[in-house]
Image (tube, grey):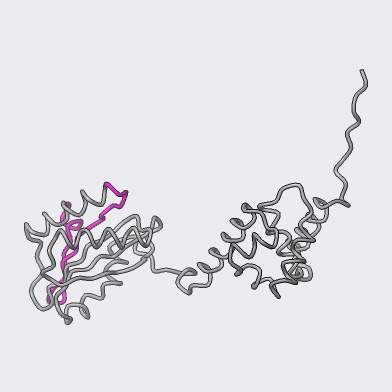
Amino acid sequence: MDRTETKPFSSTGPHGHRSRMRGRLLASEAALADYEILEMLLFLGIARRDTKPLAKGLINQFGSLSGALEADRTALAQAGVPRRAIEALDIVVEAAAVLAQPDAIQRLVIADLGALERHLDVAERTTQAPCMSALLLNNRNQLLGEPSWEADADPAVLTREMLRQALDQHATAAILVRNLGGRRPRVTDADHRLHAQVSQAAGALSVVVHDLVVLGDGDWVSLRQRGH
C-alpha cells in the first residue's frame, strides 16, 4: 500500500511568516509594523488563513492600529472581520485599558495585622468623624477599595452595599472597620453580630470576612486579635 509522504511545514506560508514575526518580537528586534501586529492579533480568531491582506485593509480603512482596535463591531464585521476575530480584538482592548490604570501596576498589600495597622494610621483616623468602612481585598490581599458608611448605618444596608461593591471590584475578602473617633475602642455584642451577619452573607458569594477592627482614641482592637 502506498504511503503519503509527509514533509515539514514550509516556512514560506502564513504559518512560517507568523513564526518569523513572533521570533522578531521575542528577540527584541526592530518593532513590528502596525499591520503586522494586527495580523498576529487577527490570527487569534482566524485559524489557518493568511491574515495579512485583512490586516492591511483594516489599517488603510481605519487609519492606524489603534483606529482598527477601537472601531465598533459593526464596522469591523462590514470590513470582513469574523466574529471570533472581533472577540479576540475586544480582549486586547480590555487588557490595554486595565494595564493603563496606574493602580493596576502596584496595589497596597494587607496580608497581616502589621500591614493593616500601618494602613489604618489609627492616630490620624481616630481624629476624624465616626464611621463604618470595609477594606476590599483580592485573592493576593491587595487593596481594591475602601467604601464607608455613616456610623449608625443599618447592618442590612451595610451588608448589601458592601457585597455589591465587593462584586463590582471582584474582591474575594474584606476587613470591616468601625471608627469610634475619640471614644475608647472595644468590641461589643453588636460588632460580633455584625461580623457574623456579614460573614454569612459574604460566604454565599465566596467572599471571606477576615476581621472586624474597632478604632478609637488613638488605639484599636480586633476580633482576630482576641482569638475570634
Q: In front here: 102 or 9?
A: 9
Q: In front here: 14 or 198?
A: 14
- Image x and y of residue 226, in percent: 15, 56
Q: In front here: 225 or 56?
A: 56
Could you tell whether 75 is left or right of 176 in the image?
A: right
Q: Is residue 227 magenta?
A: yes
Classify the position of the N terminus by image quarter. Answer: top right
Count the marks: how many? 0
Q: Is residue 57 magenta?
A: no
Residue 84 versus residue 105 in the image, above or below: above
Q: Residue at x 29, y 69 (%)?
A: 146
- Image x and y of residue 134, in percent: 25, 65
Q: Which quarter of the picture shows residue 6? A: top right
Toward the right, the furthest residue is 2
Q: Residue at x 45, y 72 (%)?
A: 103
Q: Residue at x 64, y 63 (%)?
A: 76
Q: Which quarter of the picture shows residue 139? A: bottom left
Magenta highlight range: 204-228
Could you tell whether 67 is left or right of 145 in the image?
A: right
- Image x and y of residue 54, in percent: 75, 61
Residue 182 versus residue 36 in the image, above or below: below
Q: Which quarter of the picture shows residue 89? A: bottom right
Could you tell whether 164 is left or right of 61 in the image?
A: left
- Image x and y of residue 60, in percent: 75, 72
